[in-house]
Amino acid sequence: MITCGNTFLIEDEDGYDCHLCIVITPPTYGEVVIVSITTERGRSEMLVRLQKGDHPFLEYPSVISYAYSRVTTVEEIETAVKSGTAIPRADASGKLLKRAQDGLIESDRTPNWVKLRYKEIMAANTSFS
């Protein structure tokens, strides 16, 4: 069962790199919002910077790349896990989850439709806001 705070290594569209993604909403009508963590680079968005220890998987300075945030379905994640294109990792801490959620709204790089769906999902689940 996919829940808020779950993390997964998910292959990029080309199948070359895996990025750690965090589910930042509870499943609502079968949908969740996820954000992607990438290695920090010179042109990275620096809004939410992460270090080794912020999550057990992180070894290098990293950032949440809100430009890659998206709405997906629980079914899509579960299918990816079964096929091996997504690998579950340790859940995000409450602190990391909150930073990821706050950054999604604050970031200028988050697609507007993702922000809108995030707000709708969170409004439907007031215990998570």
Image (cartoon, rainbow, N blue to C red):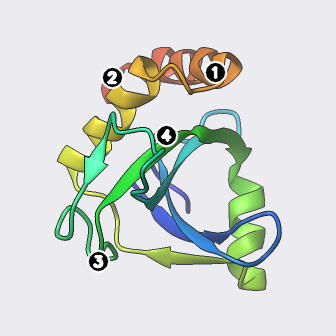
The mark closer to the camera, 4 or 3, is 3
Q: Which residue is mark 2?
A: 129
Q: Which residue is mark 1?
A: 117
Q: Which residue is mark 4?
A: 26
Marks 4 and 3, the one that precedes in the sequence: 4
- Identity of the amino acid at label 3? Glu
Marks 4 and 2, the one that precedes in the sequence: 4
- The mark found on residue 59 in the picture is 3
The mark closer to the camera, 3 or 2, is 3
Density class for disc 3 (Cα within 10 Å; few <14, some 14-19, many ≥20) is few
Q: Nearer the viewer, residue 105 or 77?
A: 105
Marks 1 and 4, the one that precedes in the sequence: 4
Q: Position of residue 18 (x, y in %)?
A: 61, 74
Q: CA distance from mark 1 to mark 2?
A: 14 Å
Q: CA distance from mark 4 to mark 3?
A: 27 Å
Density class for disc 4 (Cα within 10 Å; few <14, some 14-19, many ≥20) is many
CB under 8 Å between callouts 1 and 2? no
Q: CA distance from mark 1 to mark 3?
A: 31 Å
- Tell me the quarter of the picture where residue 75 sits: bottom right
At 39% from the left edge and 19% from the top edge, which residue is drawn? Answer: 106
- Identity of the amino acid at label 4? Pro
- Identity of the amino acid at label 2? Ser
CB under 8 Å between callouts 3 and 2? no
Q: CA distance from mark 4 to mark 2?
A: 10 Å
Marks 1 and 2, the one that precedes in the sequence: 1
Residue 116 in the figure: left or right of residue 57: right
Density class for disc 1 (Cα within 10 Å; few <14, some 14-19, many ≥20) is some
Q: CA distance from mark 3 to mark 2?
A: 30 Å
Secondary element at tag 2? loop
